[in-house]
Image (cartoon, rainbow, N blue to C red):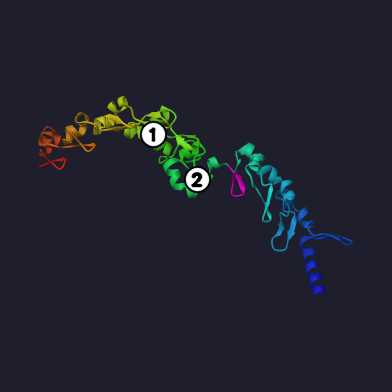
Amino acid sequence: MVMRTVRRFFGLGLLFGIVCFGTACDEDAKCKEAGACKKQGKCKVDVKEGCIAGTAEDCKVSDECKTLGKCSLKEGACVAASEAECKGSERCKTEGLCDLHEDGCVDLGKLFLPECSAECKADGHCVKRDGKCVALSNQHCFGTVDDKAEPDSVCRREGRCTVRDGSCKALSDKECEGSDACKNDAQCTAKDGKCVGTEDGCAKSTICLRAGRCSMKDGACVVASNADCKKSARCDLEGLCTLKDGKCIAATSADCGRAGVCTKAKRCRAEDGACIK
């Protein structure tokens, strides 16, 4: 038993360079001499893993504590364990890696977490803070780390391009004017963080001329009267001149009789809201 222990200790000495002076031995000498000790705090010998981080002090004096914020000991490795460690690192100052995430320091504003993918696409809430998905940068609103918003992003769809208090908001008419909401629904004015329509904007919009959505209600352009329907091209072309349940329909044969579908396609009779033969 004694000889087996001696052989095992001697084997470790050969493998890890254990240095002995008289009766005193430094089992960690080889690890301390290796570059990983200074760089990553891996200064202690481990039979299974080789060199590992053995003390919090080894982590605190390592290069990666200074550069990456990895100043705390966890299961044989140096990791970042607090926002303070990240904010004190060189990479925070030079590259913006100031946020704690999974034992490391990152820029959460440029991170897109898989668990937030649905909320990221819908509202730009792409990373987690305090257990919920939020937006932390304009890049989250853009749906990309690039400066140009993705076509399916909340910025391009709804004009909500600027992050405020964890959410993407529309803060200027310019943001709204570049959105699909303005192009398709005449919601071109920023109000309370969203793009909305106005009475004048709806009345002058293409969706008024195209679909009769000429009146404004709750920030959206809607069909509010028979007069709105009669302003639309669909009234002239398809006979959809009467308001019913929020949309324009062909309510009478008179609606159809003055429409293009009657003179060109002989669809002059109204039935179920449409003009038929």
Q: Which residue, given by chain and number where applicable, does mark 1 sit on? A: 179
Occupied quadrant, residue 220: top left
Q: Residue at x 63, y 37 (%)?
A: 94
Occupied quadrant, residue 161: top left
Is 227 left, or right, of 30 in this rendering? Answer: left
x, y percent for residue 270: 12, 39
x, y percent for residue 27: 79, 60
Tell me if mark 2 has few (under 14), some (14-19) or many (20+) residues whose alpha carbon lies within 10 angstroms of its own.
Answer: few
Is 219 left, or right, of 44 in this rendering? Answer: left
Tell me if mark 1 has few (under 14), some (14-19) or many (20+) residues whose alpha carbon lies within 10 angstroms of its own.
Answer: many
Which SS does the magenta portion mostly show?
A: strand
Q: Earlier in the sequence, mark 2 or mark 1?
A: 2
Q: Residue at x 26, y 32 (%)?
A: 213
Task: Determine if the magenta segment contains residue 202.
Answer: no
Q: Amino acid at mark 2?
A: Lys
Q: Say what secondary structure mark 2 lies in.
A: strand
Q: Which residue, given by chain and number where applicable, does mark 2 sit on? A: 132
What segment carries the magenta color? 100-106
Q: Quadrant of the N terminus?
A: bottom right
x, y percent for residue 10: 81, 67
Residue 261: which numbered mark, if any? Answer: none
Mark whose residue sits in front, 2 or 1: 2
Is 192 left, or right, of 17 in this rendering? Answer: left
Of residues 163 and 129, which is closer to you in this image?
A: 129
Q: Amino acid at mark 1?
A: Ser
Occupied quadrant, residue 261: top left
Of residues 71 and 49, which is closer to you in this image?
A: 71
Q: Is residue 215 visible?
A: yes
